[in-house]
Image (tube, helix red, strand yellow):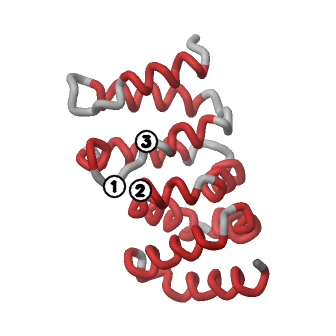
Amino acid sequence: MSTLHDLYKNLEQHKELSVGDNSNKFLDIAEQIVLQKDPSSIPILLKYFSDDGEFGDYSWVCESLMIDLEHYDSTIHVKALLENLPTLISNAPLWANDMFSRILNGETYKQIFIDNMHLAPKAALSTLFDIMEKESQHHQELIKELRDRLANHG
């Protein structure tokens, strides 16, 4: 069995998704990483998300990776996304919207998000809420509540 370090190196070697069978190899390696259930892997996997460039052209790879990340314990998953929100918004604001929309669609995940909002910088949360207001209009009321909570408890 490969060590996480070996898997990370292998993942990096297959990040050029347009080359050969790299897109499938990338996802296979990412899945092996997720199966190890090491929370320190989440930020490493998140750095590959992008709204444009090669990963933007292979949105199905990011979609699969997003779903793979949901295999982590729900609390670990949500906390890691919040802790890495500035980077995620900087590299992939639309993927950040997708990830957090999925979180806010489930009661358990939503409560974990609310309980751990303090882990993300206020500015990053505010930017996320701005993005979500445009991209996820069905969350308008919830976003207003979250903004109020951020203003009153931050």
- SS state under label 3: loop
Disc 2 target residue: 92
Disc 3 target residue: 48
What is the spatial separation of the Cα atoms under label 2 and label 1, in whole angstroms? 5 Å
| Badge 2 density bin: few <14, some 14–19, many ≥20, Cα 10 Å | many
State the image coordinates of residue 16 (x, y, percent, origin top left): 29, 30
State the image coordinates of residue 14 (x, y, percent, origin top left): 35, 25
Residue at (23, 47) in percent of width and height: 57
- Do the numbered discs 2 and 1 sit on residues whose CB atoms are within 8 Å? yes
Disc 1 target residue: 51
Quarter of the rendering containing residue 125: bottom right
The residue under label 2 is which amino acid type?
Answer: Ala
Residue at (45, 81) in percent of width and height: 133
In the rendered image, the vertical position of residue 57 relative to residue 120, given as above or below: above
The residue under label 1 is which amino acid type?
Answer: Asp
The residue under label 3 is which amino acid type?
Answer: Tyr
State the image coordinates of residue 86 (x, y, percent, origin top left): 56, 59
In the image, taking residue 151 as reference, residue 32 lies left or right, namely left
Q: Who is closer to the viewer here, 3 or 60?
A: 3
